[in-house]
Image (tube, rainbow, N blue to C red):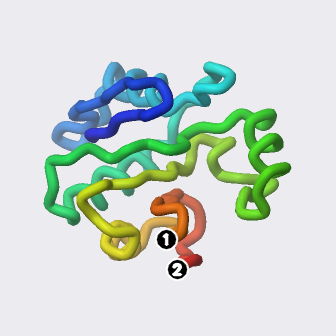
Amino acid sequence: LRMHSGRTGERIDTIYWIEGEYIREALAEINHFMRDWRTDGAVSYDTRNIDILAASHRLLDTDQPYLLLSGYRSPKTNAMLRSKSRNVARNSLHMKGQAADIRLPSRSVSQISKAAITCSAGGVGRYSRSNFVHMDCGPVRVWGR
């Protein structure tokens, strides 16, 4: 999994799964990286969502890391964002460590979303006007343009 955060300046480039086993230390690193940077709160990120992110990235055939816009969100952060945008769900999967909003400068929203949709493993939101894709491990569904 390769990502960087514009908010914290942190980068992650890790192998988190080998021969059918998740690597506990790598998952701990991912949990910290995906934390709510506003509150410094973290959760145990759902490995299904990590798998979707990694599989989609492989399908995009690039070495460029994702830019993480939003990983885990505390209820407080989610409420604040919800008060500013109608596109933030009240019971967002971000609050469960089951969603991520990402951007990949070398690929379009359409390309990234197609890769995620190909995984048939969760929700894919296309936010072309804001230039990002939402990926979650909830029910399979697609929205946005």
Distance between the alpha carbons at the discs numbered 1 and 2: 6 Å
Read off the residue under disc 2. Answer: 145
Q: Which residue is farthest front?
A: 129
- Residue 77's quadrant in the figure? top right
Pinpoint residue 34: horizontal percent, then vertical percent.
49, 33
Secondary structure under badge 1?
loop
**Left or right: 81 with respect to 42?**
right
Q: Is residue 143 above or below residue 58?
A: below
Residue 62: numbered disc: none
Q: Is residue 70 above or below residue 53?
A: above
- Residue 18's quadrant in the figure? top left
**Residue under the point 31% across and 34% down:** 22
Secondary structure under badge 2?
loop
Read off the residue under disc 1. Answer: 128
Front-lying residue, 41 or 85: 85
Q: Number of callouts in the render?
A: 2
**Residue under the point 80% across and 33% down:** 76
Tell me which label, 1 or 2, sits earlier in the chain: 1
Amino acid on which disc 1 is placed: Ser
Q: Is residue 61 above or below residue 73?
A: below
Mark 1 and mark 2 residues within 8 Å of each other at the beta carbon: yes
Pinpoint residue 38: horizontal percent, then vertical percent.
65, 26
Q: Residues within 10 Å of mark 2 (few under 14, many from 20)?
A: few
**Residue under the point 62% across and 19% down:** 40
Q: Residues within 10 Å of mark 1 (few under 14, many from 20)?
A: few
Pinpoint residue 59: horizontal percent, then vertical percent.
21, 65
Front-lying residue, 90 or 126: 126
**Residue under the point 44% across and 27% down:** 33
**Left or right: 4 with respect to 98?**
left
Amino acid on which disc 2 is placed: Arg
Quadrant occupied by the N terminus: top left
